[in-house]
Image: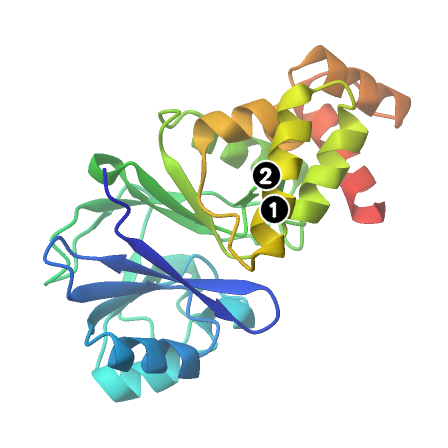
Amino acid sequence: MDTPVVLIPALRDNYVALLHSPNGRNVAIVDPAEAEPVIRYLGEHDLQPVAIFNTHHHPDHVGGNRELQKAYDLPVYGAAEDRDRIPGLTHPMYDGDRVTPAGLDRAGVLWDIPGHTRTHTAFVFPDDELVFAGDTLFVAGCGRLFEGTPEQMEASLSRLAGLPDATRVYCGHEYTLKNLEFARAVEPDNPAIEEKLRWAEERRQRGEPTLPSTIGAEKRTNPFLRVREPAVREAARVGGAAGDDPVSVFAAIREWKDRF
């Protein structure tokens, strides 16, 4: 399957994703950190934006909303609970709502995946085997808990892990190298992590993104999706986990990552 997604670097380490329609010319803009590089790319490639998707309210994911709306009169899709925090929100949505902007000709669904923030969403496109996970699931990592709880984040990550292994994962930042270095510290004997780290280093040396990942790859290398694995549970225990249940293990590993 051809990948209908283009990544535009923005700010220091953000990615703005463009999801193409099957005809190739119409696009939905996912988490526009800023407008200028998006507008430039759209003009250079003769693309027509038809919607903005926001996974959460943080400025580095919604900073371009107003300028893009002004330039293209775009609908904005995001969580209803964030209607006061997502600029220009026109389509407040709830878990399970279908995402079908006119002109995109792709069928998505909105998932609630809180933890990084109290309200955070993913845009899942099952037929295309794609998920836009924002700052909940990174390559080999997950977002910090700014407003949510370990229980929420562990449940959200488990939900994402239930997607088919071939599902391609697009996230909001280029954090892969640091995340894999931490994953190696958690599981030093995991060869999949070492292989992925070498691959990521080569990609970054060429100036190429390390996205997308896949759900299957994350289940092999991401410590936050591996909280039921004996080696990760042992690492959490050494780090002072309150128990060996998935939430306790997750909380201990996340606290360790915050200090890493």
- Residue 147 is situated, as x and y percent measured from the top left of the image, at 64, 54
For the point 41% across and 76% down, the residue is 87
**Left or right: 248 in relation to 29:** right
Query: Which residue is nearer to you in this view: 248 or 8?
Result: 8
Q: Quadrant of residue 46?
A: bottom left
Query: Which residue is nearer to you in this view: 53 or 5?
Result: 5
What is the three-letter code of the residue carrying label 2? Answer: Trp
**Label 1 Cα crowd, 10 Å radius (few <14 / some 14-19 / many 20+):** few
The image's mark for residue 199 is 2
For the point 36% across and 86% down, the residue is 67
What is the three-letter code of the residue carrying label 1? Answer: Glu
From this viewpoint, is residue 249 visible? yes
**Left or right: 227 in relation to 123:** right
Residue on which the image places disc 1: 202
Residue most extreme to the top: 230
- Residue 79 is situated, as x and y percent measured from the top left of the image, at 38, 57
- Residue 208 is situated, as x and y percent measured from the top left of the image, at 51, 56
From this viewpoint, is residue 140 visible? no
The local secondary structure at tag 1 comes to helix
- Residue 145 is situated, as x and y percent measured from the top left of the image, at 67, 49
- Tell me whether circle 2 and circle 1 mark residues in contact (CB < 8 Å): yes
For the point 43% across and 57% down, the residue is 55
**Left or right: 238 in relation to 227:** right
Identify the image quadrant of the C terminus.
top right
Identify the image quadrant of the N terminus.
top left
Up-down relation of residue 38 to residue 247 (above or below): below
Up-down relation of residue 164 to residue 11 (above or below): above
Q: CA distance from mark 2 to mark 1?
A: 5 Å
